[in-house]
Amino acid sequence: MRMTVADVMTEKVVTVTAATPFKEIAETLISGGISAVPVTDDDRHVLGVVSEADLLRKEEFREQFYREGYQPPLRARMRHPKGRQKAAGDTAAELMTSPAVCVSPEASAVEAARLMDTHDVKRLAVVDYNGRLVGIVSRRDLVKLFLRADEDIAVEVREDILVRNLWVDTSGVEVEVHQGVVTLSGWMERRSEAGIAARMTHRVNGVVDVVDKLAWKQDDSLRETR
């Protein structure tokens, strides 16, 4: 089963508008137990995201709390070149990171994870084909995929991968799953088929690793040289 963003996202999303003041944003994050909030317009189009880090710029760059001529650490200035600008912000429009990194609810969980890694973000706004907010997916939501029961994983590998998808004789294959680690043992007719079975098993949601102990009757990886 291909797990999509829609399967793991949070649908009830707390939002703020561009005009929402700093203090109200902070109260929203604390009361909701969340680390970021999307900024939307009247039609729920996502304008950006305000995170705890965006709010903390005000402290990191607050010069009046220090001696005259104080400069925030070089590392902070290099890491957040717009930090001083955000530190002066009083509304969501001035504080938010924009544009927000968005994903479709039909996208796979793997696609969402790659987007987070590419853009170095902890969450993605989930938008429909009109660009309207329908949910939020976070790193924690994706980590939950690895909590899938071993038996559920084993059933999917046996029934979906080995029986429905490979279209070859898999009667000699045994599947064991422990703590998300799948062990494939037994035999298959060809070496290439065994390799495909292992690679497809890696893609099953909840699989932590695959131990390939499959043997084969025919090594079709060998090619005659002329």
Image (spheres, rainbow, N blue to C red):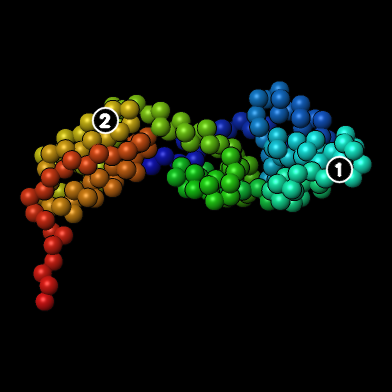
Q: Nearer the viewer, residue 194 or 164?
A: 194
Number of marks in the rendered image: 2
- Number of residues whose C-alpha sits closer than 10 Å to that of mark 2, classed few (under 14), some (14–19) or many (20 or more): many
Residue located farthest toward the top when viewing the structure as drawn? 31
Q: Residue at x 46, y 30 (%)?
A: 144
Side of 139 where 28 appears, left or right: right
Residue located farthest toward the bottom when viewing the structure as drawn? 226
Side of 224 where 95 appears, left or right: right
Q: Residue at x 28, y 39 (%)?
A: 210
Q: Are marks 2 and 1 in contact (CB under 8 Å)?
A: no
Q: Residue at x 38, y 42 (%)?
A: 2
Residue 130 shows in the view: yes
As measured in the structure, the alpha-carbon distance from the residue carrying label 2 to the one carrying label 1 is 58 Å
Instruction: Locate the C terminus by quadrant.
Output: bottom left
For badge 2, the amino acid type reads Val
Residue at disc 2, secondary structure: strand
Residue at disc 1, secondary structure: loop
- Number of residues whose C-alpha sits closer than 10 Å to that of mark 1, classed few (under 14), some (14–19) or many (20 or more): few
Instruction: Locate the N terminus by quadrant.
Output: top left
Q: Is residue 188 above or below residue 13?
A: below
Q: Earlier in the sequence, mark 2 or mark 1?
A: 1
Q: Position of residue 38 (x, y in %)?
A: 68, 39
| Occupied quadrant, residue 156 | top left
For badge 1, the amino acid type reads Tyr
Determine which of the numbered discs, if any, sits on residue 177 in the image: 2
Determine which of the numbered discs, if any, sits on residue 10 in the image: none
Residue 41 shows in the view: no
Q: Is residue 153 above or below residue 116?
A: above
Q: Position of residue 100 (x, y in %)?
A: 65, 48
Q: Position of residue 181 (x, y in %)?
A: 30, 33
Residue located farthest toward the left when viewing the structure as drawn? 217
Q: Which residue is mark 1?
A: 70
